[in-house]
Image (cartoon, grey):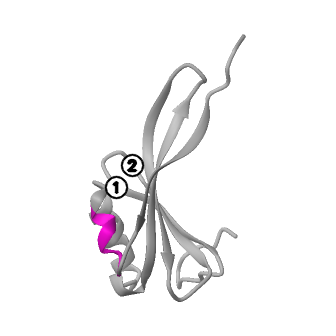
Amino acid sequence: MIFVPRILVLIVALLSSIGGAAAASHHCAGAAADAMAQLGITPAQIKRTVFIDVIEGTRNSTTVVGYEAWVDLNSCQGTVVAKMSLQCDVEEIYSRGECKISNLKNDH
């Protein structure tokens, strides 16, 4: 039987934060905070940050290939998502739901 590789997303840590401070537990927290700052989003505007491992593989073998930071804001119903490499380089950033951020694609 052949298993087709697929990307699986597993939640690694759910970090409830006061002003985004608790997100510092993940090793990519600094890169995520920098990405938010470049968008003009301050720690006080962040309700919660969830870091997710992006997993690729088969049923028998999986590998972490990157991370995603899902950032919920106090000001909107939705999320800003930063896709990152294993080295925490931000590869893509977009918003979801009702969060409309200037110069960001919204992926409902």
Residue 82 position within the rendered picture, expressed as x and y whole percent measured from the top left: 46, 63
Q: Nearer the viewer, residue 29 or 18?
A: 18
Secondary structure mostly taken by the magenta-highlighted segment of the chain = helix
Residue 84 position within the rendered picture, expressed as x and y whole percent measured from the top left: 41, 54
Q: Relative to 58, is 11 above or below?
A: below
The amino acid marked with disc number 2 is Ser
The total of numbered circles placed on residues is: 2
Residue 74 position within the rendered picture, expressed as x and y whole percent measured from the top left: 50, 85
Badge 2 element: loop
Q: Quadrant of the N terminus?
A: top right
Where does the magenta region start and end?
19-24
The amino acid marked with disc number 1 is Asp
Q: Quadrant of the C terminus?
A: bottom right
Residue at position x 50%, y 44% in the image: 54
Check residue 27 for magenta coloring.
no
Check residue 20 for magenta coloring.
yes
Left or right? Give the position of 75 relative to 40.
right
Residue 66 position within the rendered picture, expressed as x and y whole percent measured from the top left: 43, 45
Residue behind mark 1: 89
Circles 1, 2 touching at the beta carbon (< 8 Å): yes
The span from disc 1 to disc 2 (Cα, nearest Å) is 5 Å
Mark 1 surroundings: few (<14), some (14-19) or many (≥20) residues within 10 A: some
Residue at position x 31%, y 62% in the image: 29
Badge 1 element: loop
Left or right? Give the position of 15 relative to 56.
left
Residue behind mark 2: 85
